[in-house]
Amino acid sequence: MQIDFSPVEIGEVTLYEFAQRFSVDDLRSATNSSLNTILEILGDADDAQLTFIPDDPLADDPIAPPEERYQGWNLAHLVAHVTATSEEWATYSGILARGIVYPREPRLRRETDWHTLKTRDQVIARIAESRRMRLAALESWPNTPYLDVFRDMSENFIAKRGPVNAKSAFLFGYRHEQGHLEQFREAARQAREAIKAR
């Protein structure tokens, strides 16, 4: 199950309002579908393709080392990035579902250093690990989750997306991952063409 965020994108509803229609089973199915889509994009990419640095004229990562700020993200980097964000927000969802208010800080995010993902086995293992962790976060929800408990977020965040409860927290990470799929596809295309040309 892939979730279509069109109603959110065109401003019909906030992410919070949109999220409330989905069950835990829906979130589980969407997670599996998203990660399976990434695996399909990677296909049979080998180590060289997964670590190939693509050209990306939109690249601008202000927290990267200066020499990497305007560098395109390879497939391994994309995997490290999207899995970290999805895991972070899945973790918040499990906390909120149990009725615990979570503050803005500290963030519960740890991104694998993409420089260490050098082989296909490592990249595939990172995806499998992320799947296990995210599905475990959903398993931590009680049978009757507390959907009236919210994370402390900035007024600006809430104005744009609505408040953050367990469901909208989980979908925030999922939506972020979906937003990178075209970047995955383009990086994979460039990697295949570059390696084939050698």
Image (tube, helix red, strand yellow):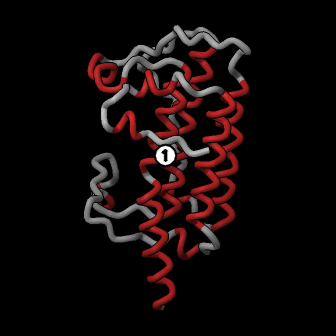
Give coordinates of residue 142: x percent, y percent: 71, 15
Give coordinates of residue 45: x percent, y percent: 60, 73
Question: Looking at the image, how many numbered discs can be counted on the residues?
Answer: 1
Q: Is residue 198 above or below residue 18?
A: below
Q: Is residue 24 above or below residue 121?
A: above
- Asked whether, in this view, residue 174 is left or right of residue 64, the answer is right
Q: Amino acid at mark 1?
A: Glu
Q: Residue at x 29, y 20 (%)?
A: 159
Q: In the structure shown, which secondary structural element does the residue marked by tag 1 occupy? A: helix
Q: Is residue 32 above or below residue 7?
A: below
Q: Residue at x 46, y 82 (%)?
A: 193
Circle 1 sits on which residue?
Answer: 177
Give the quadrant of the N terminus: top right
Q: Residue at x 66, y 46 (%)?
A: 32
- Asked whether, in this view, residue 26 is left or right of residue 174, the answer is right
Q: Residue furthest bottom?
A: 198
Q: Is residue 6 above or below residue 115?
A: above
Nearest to the observer: residue 134 or residue 116: 134
Give coordinates of residue 81: x percent, y percent: 48, 48
Give coordinates of residue 25: x percent, y percent: 69, 31
Q: Residues within 10 Å of mark 1 (few under 14, many from 20)?
A: many
- Asked whether, in this view, residue 115 is left or right of residue 25, the answer is left
Q: Residue at x 33, y 60 (%)?
A: 68
Nearest to the observer: residue 117 or residue 176: 176
